[in-house]
Image: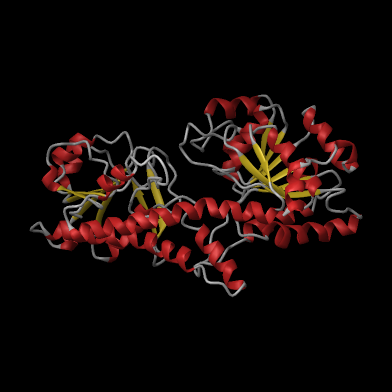
């Protein structure tokens, strides 16, 4: 343990840095280093715009040609990026998007910000990371630093990315930690969170060697206020999984308690959590919902459970939590079916209006949204007349569980739309929704977010998840 603490607390003297590290350090300090960001989505584009905004020439790489065209015209598609900030760095020539790796040789610092999904069997799909690493390797040269930011399992940086780079490096006589550098620094993006941005959210950095760690930390310090170095990429990779699994486990706990409160009746889990949150120590409030969304929390438990099986270890507690959360859309559908059954209308003729298809409030992010699963399940149950309204998502396209491609368009949320449907389901608690109007004109409301908690009237037609009457 002493060696680890020393590696973190006693930085390498700059005069002892490898020459290539010193050269890159100078480029960073005088802003002549070129930054390359691979993957221009929710993680990559904000990072690229942040570096460009600090005066670094930044190249963004994305295989989506339409994205590249839009970005080079100054058109933004990520909610967490300010439109004016993107236009400014494009007009000043500080940011340019590319749909191939032809200019990769110009890059001094690469960030890999590509998707890391799971296969249909819940195993990690690292094909995007592999492809990005191979693209970098084809242009690898002395003085380059590669930082993997995509959420993944421990040993991805050293077990997957490093061998790909080393195969090319050996041909050129380059040595890792002396001539080129490699580290892992997990992303910490919370879509729609204006309080914590790329700049003011602390980040963790773990390099393959001490020089890699310190160089990667120096790079991150150009755009992030606080950088916390750790002893290895594996520690940083596991730390990221802990962040998200912590939330998954606690959400699963409160989801299970919500279902118990509904079974018992007369107990609201929302009131229970609010009461428990008055304790000033030893408790952190989490709230129930219709299922998990976004990229990390629904995925990360399976990354760790897959890795654990390689070591003959079963992450029973973590896997169980993931299963509990995955069952919530089914629970919501059962509540919708009961709400339909209370009315004199066959299931096949029922009209259901989904309010909100983004995975969280006040964002346009629909990745792994539980709303799509609820829509899919309702269709499988025989409900064919399903519409949705979401001010942040004008159109929705997704593949159903059976492989069917489904495309929907948001409908205007007004009195006529509310009264035209038999059941209204609040899936996302967007601040823009007119909850008083919803309570007034919707025949029956299935509220999965307790979004109508401040509406005093028409409570008899509101079914709240975990409210004791769901």
- The image quadrant where one finds the N terminus is bottom right
Q: Residue at x 49, y 55 (%)?
A: 245
User: x%, y% of residue 187?
Assistant: 59, 45
Number of marks: 0
Q: Is residue 343 left or right of residue 465?
A: left
Residue found 10% across the figure and 56% down from its top? 343
Q: Identify whether 159 is placed above or below 191.
A: below
Image x and y of residue 63, in percent = 63, 49
| Left or right of 32 on screen, residue 430 | left
The residue nearer to you, when weighing 264 against 27, is 264
Asked if residue 310 lies left or right of residue 381, the reply is right
**Residue 418 visible in the current orientation:** yes
Q: Looking at this view, is 405 or 212 the one in front?
A: 212
Say which quarter of the image contains residue 345: bottom left
Look at the image and tell me whether residue 102 can be seen. no
Judging depth in this view, the residue of 311 and 398 nearest the camera is: 311
Residue depicted at x 42% and y 42%: 281
Residue closest to the far bottom: 312
Q: Is residue 258 above or below residue 412?
A: below
- x, y percentage for residue 353? 24, 49
Q: Tell me which corner region of the image, top left, top right, bottom left or bottom right, holds residue 418.
A: top left
Q: How is the image coloured?
A: secondary structure
Image spot of residue 122 (x, y percent) = 51, 67
Q: In the picture, which quadrant includes the C terminus?
A: bottom left
Q: Residue at x 84, y 41 (%)?
A: 21
């Amino acid at each position: 343990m002493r060696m680890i603490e020393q590696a973190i607390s006693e930085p390498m003297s700059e005069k002892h840095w490898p020459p290539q590290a010193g050269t890159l350090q100078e480029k960073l300090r005088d802003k002549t280093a070129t930054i390359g960001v691979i993957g221009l989505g929710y993680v990559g584009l904000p990072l690229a715009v942040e570096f460009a905004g600090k005066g670094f020439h930044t190249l963004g790489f994305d295989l989506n040609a339409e994205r590249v065209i839009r970005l080079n015209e100054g058109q933004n598609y990520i909610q967490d990026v300010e439109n004016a900030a993107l236009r400014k760095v494009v007009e000043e020539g500080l940011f340019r998007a590319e749909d191939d790796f032809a200019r990769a040789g110009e890059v001094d610092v690469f960030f890999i910000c590509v998707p890391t999904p799971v296969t249909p069997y819940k195993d990690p799909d690292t094909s995007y990371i592999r492809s990005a690493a191979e693209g970098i390797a084809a242009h690898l040269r002395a003085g380059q630093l590669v930082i993997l930011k995509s959420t993944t399992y421990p040993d991805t940086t050293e077990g997957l990315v490093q061998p790909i780079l080393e195969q090319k490096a050996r041909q050129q006589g380059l040595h890792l930690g002396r001539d080129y550098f490699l580290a892992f620094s997990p992303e910490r993006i919370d879509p729609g969170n204006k309080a914590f941005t790329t700049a003011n959210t602390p980040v963790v950095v773990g390099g393959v060697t001490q020089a890699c760690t310190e160089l990667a930390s120096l790079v991150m310090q150009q755009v992030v206020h606080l950088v916390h170095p750790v002893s290895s990429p594996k520690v940083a990779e596991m730390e990221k999984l802990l962040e998200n699994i912590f939330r998954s486990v606690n959400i699963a706990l409160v989801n299970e308690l919500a279902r118990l409160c509904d079974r018992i009746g007369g107990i609201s889990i929302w009131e229970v959590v609010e009461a428990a949150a008055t304790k000033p120590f030893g408790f952190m409030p989490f709230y129930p919902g219709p299922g998990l969304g976004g990229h990390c929390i629904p995925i990360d438990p399976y990354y760790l459970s897959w890795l654990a099986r390689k070591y003959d270890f079963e992450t029973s507690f973590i896997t169980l939590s993931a299963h509990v959360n995955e069952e919530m859309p089914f629970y919501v559908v059962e509540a919708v079916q009961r709400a339909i059954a209370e009315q004199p209308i066959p299931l096949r003729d029922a009209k259901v209006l989904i309010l909100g298809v983004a995975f969280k409030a006040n964002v346009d992010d629909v990745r792994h949204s539980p709303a799509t699963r609820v829509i899919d399940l309702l269709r499988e149950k025989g409900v064919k007349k399903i519409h949705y309204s979401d001010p942040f998502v004008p159109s929705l396209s997704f593949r159903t569980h059976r492989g069917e491609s489904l495309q929907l368009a948001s409908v205007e949320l007004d009195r006529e739309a509310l009264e035209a449907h038999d059941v209204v389901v609040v899936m996302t608690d967007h601040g823009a929704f007119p909850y008083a109007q919803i309570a007034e004109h919707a025949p029956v409301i299935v509220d999965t977010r307790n979004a109508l908690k401040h509406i005093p009237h028409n409570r008899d037609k509101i079914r709240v998840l975990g409210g004791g009457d769901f």
